[in-house]
């Protein structure tokens, strides 16, 4: 047996796949969910390349073309209708099926993803005996930004119709897709450089324009660091590969970051403002690592300015602080008082923060933007300034909490649910506890707590109001 196949069989066995189960590939998603995932998947943009390179081969030899995501879930399958029906009936080789090694055993898609290289699997080389009448060739596709596998492209057909160039075609197609994705990446980098050219050019001292994945795509001055940087969601302080401390400032909705060395920031007299506002009535505020005492109203203003990096007029700030009866003059007085405490780091036309900011709110939002739902829930210490009645703060509080709740309830990740029900917002939420109870493994000791919590909430809210 070839070494890559032997290694794959070992992984399949360790994953608990039964080679004699006679079971086709498991279903991982319904067609509605598959369509939504495919629409948002980066490989969907490469359909012309996939059809042009694999279409002729598939048409000649009754093969099917398939594209999976990084988990081996089939997102798109193409071929002659009779061939698609045959493969779907015999193997469940259809959109929504899971063809990872852990789901189906050794197969080209799952093995290419697991081994991170192109592979062809012939007949009896398949771990699952049900699939041993078929042959397939697949290659993984990498995101040029993160370098991670985002999916696989595959040719599958019956053993009687094996094509001698299937392996080469799959490998060449994956290379063409990656080239296409690199082109899109370079175009996106160029747009970011153009969009933030003035912001970068107006920065004192050396700085770098960096993508969320840590790639340096531009900058100003003699920026020495060209290695990939580790930037936390929401930005804030980081340590460069050289060991020098720096600060990453989010630009836009974290589509990029402006990174500056701490010593350059200090020489420009622009301190780092740190705020913790989640689950607190009174925010924890520090400037250049020096604790700062501010009023509750000052805290509300800071929360609103962070939510509006482009700035706010006095009319907008008054409305967000006091509602329809708010007076711009009152907002101007509040800003004046805050500037006396904070320094000159609030512009007045419009009102906006002009120094680097690190906040727990931005950290949670950044994690949600990146799809790290569990981490976001674990970082969420409670609602934003929970007792504030300022209309703008209520809006931002409800927006963040709704976003996190929706992400947790749709993530299909028990650990994210567990983190959510530990928060002040989630601990009384019946739907979350019920979902957790259903999703936890039967042996998980937390199931007993989840069951008890569901029962207590039912007793406390007999009309079903909890959650």
Image (tube, rainbow, N blue to C red):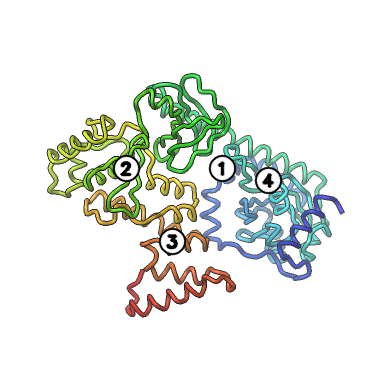
Instruction: Report which residue position mark 3 lands on.
Output: 420
Q: Earlier in the sequence, mark 3 or mark 1?
A: 1
- The residue where tag 4 is placed is 140
Give the residue pinned by disc 1.
45
Q: Is residue 67 left or right of residue 240?
A: right
| Distance CA(mark 3)–CA(mark 2) | 25 Å
Residue at 18 percent across and 37 percent down: it is 337
Q: Residue at (62%, 64%) from the top-left corner?
A: 27
Q: In which quarter of the image is the C terminus?
A: bottom left
Quadrant in the picture for residue 258: top left
Instruction: Say whether disc 2 or disc 4 marks the residue closer to the N-terminus.
Output: 4
Residue at far top of view = 221
The quadrant in which the N terminus is found is bottom right
Kind of element beneath mark 2: strand
Q: Residue at 69% of width from left, 41% of height from top? A: 173
Compute the Cα span from label 4 to label 1.
16 Å
Q: Do callouts 2 and 4 mark residues in contact (Cβ within 8 Å)?
A: no
Residue annotated with mark 2: 285
Mark 3: secondary structure: helix
Q: In which quarter of the image is residue 54?
A: top right
The nearer-to-camera label among 2 and 4 is 2
Compared to 271, does 76 lie above or below? Answer: below
Mark 1 closeness class: few <14, some 14–19, many ≥20 residues within 10 Å: some
Which one is nearer the viewer's eye here, 55 or 170? 170
């Amino acid at each position: 047996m070839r070494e890559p196949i032997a290694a794959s069989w070992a992984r399949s066995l360790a994953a608990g796949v039964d080679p004699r189960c006679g079971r086709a590939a498991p279903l991982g998603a319904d067609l509605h969910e598959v369509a939504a995932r495919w629409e948002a998947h980066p490989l969907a943009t490469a359909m012309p390349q996939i059809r042009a390179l694999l279409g002729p081969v598939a048409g000649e030899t009754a093969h099917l073309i398939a594209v999976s995501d990084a988990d081996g879930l089939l997102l798109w399958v193409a071929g002659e209708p009779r061939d698609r029906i045959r493969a779907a009936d015999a193997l469940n080789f259809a959109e929504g099926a899971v063809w990872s090694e852990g789901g189906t055993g050794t197969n080209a898609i799952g093995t290419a993803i697991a081994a991170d290289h192109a592979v062809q699997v012939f007949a009896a080389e398949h771990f699952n005996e049900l699939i041993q009448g078929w042959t397939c060739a697949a290659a993984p596709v990498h995101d040029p930004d993160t370098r991670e596998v985002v999916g696989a492209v595959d040719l599958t057909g019956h053993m009687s119709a094996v094509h001698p160039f299937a392996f080469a075609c799959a490998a060449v197609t994956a290379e063409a897709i990656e080239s296409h994705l690199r082109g899109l990446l370079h175009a996106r980098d160029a747009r970011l450089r153009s969009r933030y050219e003035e912001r970068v050019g107006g920065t004192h001292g050396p700085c770098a324009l960096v993508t969320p994945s840590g790639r340096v795509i531009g900058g100003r001055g003699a920026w020495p660091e060209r290695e990939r940087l580790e930037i936390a969601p929401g930005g804030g302080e980081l340590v460069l590969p050289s060991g020098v401390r720096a600060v990453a400032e989010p630009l836009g909705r974290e589509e990029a970051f402006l990174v500056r060395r701490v010593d350059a920031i200090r020489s420009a007299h622009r301190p780092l403002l740190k705020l913790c506002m989640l689950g607190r009535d009174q925010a924890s505020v520090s400037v250049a690592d020096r604790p700062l005492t501010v009023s509750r109203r000052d805290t509300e203003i800071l929360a609103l300015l962070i939510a509006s990096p482009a700035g706010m007029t006095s009319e907008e700030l008054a409305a967000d602080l006091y509602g329809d009866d708010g007076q711009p003059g009152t907002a101007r007085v509040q800003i004046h008082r805050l500037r006396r405490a904070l320094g000159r780091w609030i512009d007045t036309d419009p009102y906006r923060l002009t120094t680097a900011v690190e906040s727990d709110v931005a950290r949670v939002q950044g994690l949600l933007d990146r799809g790290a739902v569990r981490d976001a829930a674990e970082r969420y210490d409670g609602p934003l300034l929970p007792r504030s009645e300022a209309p703008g703060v209520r809006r931002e509080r409800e927006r963040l909490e709704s976003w996190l709740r929706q992400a947790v309830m749709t993530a299909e990740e028990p650990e994210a649910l567990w983190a959510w029900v530990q928060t002040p917002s989630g601990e009384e939420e019946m739907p979350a506890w019920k979902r957790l109870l259903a999703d936890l493994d039967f042996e998980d000791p937390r199931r007993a707590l989840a069951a008890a919590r569901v029962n207590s909430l039912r007793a406390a809210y007999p009309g079903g109001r909890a959650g």
